């Protein structure tokens, strides 16, 4: 039986085991997907080889650090500067990043990307994946970030504009995408932007999905915006992982159903 898993710290909250196990079972692949809380990253990565884990998801705080421990990093993940997926080919480990693809697939379910302007809030790993994916898909991102230097560096890396977070009210964009963790449980009372600037965006997307309806999403809906949670991005980044690992077509609807049910159950 093949073994897959997620490495991170903490990982107890991760919905990846639920999502991936349901998908592997539905595809009839005899495999187990487990969560591994990492004490020592280098030893854990060597353990992937030693235990012959077939494929591994990588979560916080290791998405960048893990890159130096792999045999190869695919060009997209290198450009993003983070790996969220490892493939083990007989001990040879290759890193990929499926976060950008996940976001783009989710956005494409509801909107066109080419030629549209996207205000990307944040400049961390998720923002880099979002900007990379948007540029690849022909979108025009503008980066908004609290720390100007970090935002400028990200914008320069992908040839797009930067605006300080405080100037959000002056940004023209079709869609705002929050990639900061602000509003994520347990800090659910927080929002990364004041409610009165939201109405200028036709779409507001929050890549946070715990809770499913963040304060940002609730306030954006009240301001007349169309909204999207991070659930779809999470499902699609996982589906792309499964496709990379197994070559099979992932059961996306099933994956969405099991994760959504768990999130609703959790409130
Ligand atoms: N839906 C999905 O599939 C998916 C995938 C990946 C990540 N995520 C979520 O995305 C979020 C960010 O992840 P990450 O890896 O990019 O984190 P990260 O690397 O730590 O980056 C966080 C970014 O948020 C900004 N930020 C943090 N607190 C802020 C505040 N109070 N006000 C304004 N800006 C603030 C930081 O700004 P500074 O530069 O000023 O510090 C930084 O740019 C997490 O909640 C994660 O769960 C979702």
Image (tube, rainbow, N blue to C red):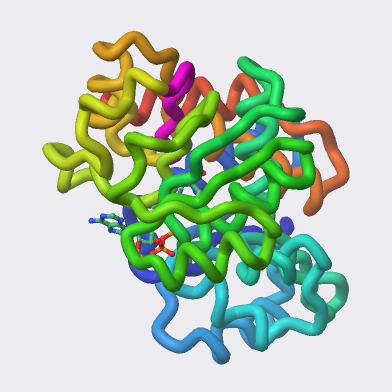
Closer-to-camera residue (120/245): 120
- Relative placement, left or right, of 23 versus 146 is right
Residue extent of the magenta highlight: 201-207
Q: Please, which residue is most extreme toward the left here?
A: 189
- Queried whether the magenta region covers residue 204, the answer comes back as yes
Q: Quadrant of the C terminus?
A: top left
Q: Residue at 62% of width from left, 15% of height from top?
A: 110
> Visible in this render: residue 231?
no
Q: Is residue 151 visible?
A: yes
Is residue 144 on the magenta stretch? Answer: no
Q: Could you say where residue 135 lies in the image, as x and y percent from the top left?
A: 73, 46
In the image, residue 243 sits, relative to residue 173, either above or below, namely: below
> What residue appears at the point 66 percent right and 87 percent down from the top-left corner?
68
In the displayed orientation, state which residue is furthest to the front.
170
Q: Please state, as top left, top right, bottom left or bottom right, where the N terminus lies in the image.
A: bottom right
How many discs appear?
0
Horizontal relation, residue 229 to residue 24: left or right: left
Which image quadrant is residue 140 in?
Answer: top right
Rendered residue at 55%/46% (across/down)? 142
* Above or below: residue 222 compared with residue 22: above
């Amino acid at each position: 039986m093949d073994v897959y898993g997620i490495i991170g710290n903490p990982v107890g909250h991760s919905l990846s085991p639920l999502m991936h196990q349901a998908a592997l079972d539905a595809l009839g692949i005899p495999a187990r997907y487990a969560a591994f809380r990492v004490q020592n990253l280098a030893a854990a990565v060597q353990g992937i080889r030693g235990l012959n884990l077939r494929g591994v998801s990588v979560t916080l705080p290791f998405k960048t650090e893990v890159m130096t421990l792999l045999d190869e990093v695919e060009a997209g993940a290198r450009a993003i500067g983070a790996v969220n997926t490892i493939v083990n080919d007989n001990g040879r480990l290759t890193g990929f990043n499926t976060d950008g693809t996940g976001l783009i697939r989710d956005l494409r379910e509801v909107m066109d990307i080419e030629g549209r302007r996207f205000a990307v809030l944040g400049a961390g790993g998720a923002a880099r994946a979002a900007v990379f994916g948007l540029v690849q898909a022909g979108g025009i991102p503008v980066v908004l970030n609290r720390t100007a230097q970090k935002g400028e560096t990200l914008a320069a890396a992908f040839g797009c504009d930067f605006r300080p977070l405080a100037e959000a009210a002056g940004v023209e964009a079709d869609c705002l995408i929050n990639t900061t963790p602000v509003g994520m449980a347990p800090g659910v009372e927080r929002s990364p932007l004041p409610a009165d600037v939201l109405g200028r965006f036709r779409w507001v997307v929050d890549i946070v999905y715990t809770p499913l309806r963040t304060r940002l999403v609730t306030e954006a809906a009240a301001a007349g915006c169309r909204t999207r949670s991070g659930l779809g991005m999470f499902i699609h980044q996982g589906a792309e992982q499964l496709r990379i690992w197994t070559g099979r077509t992932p059961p996306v609807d099933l994956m969405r159903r099991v994760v959504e049910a768990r999130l609703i159950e959790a409130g």
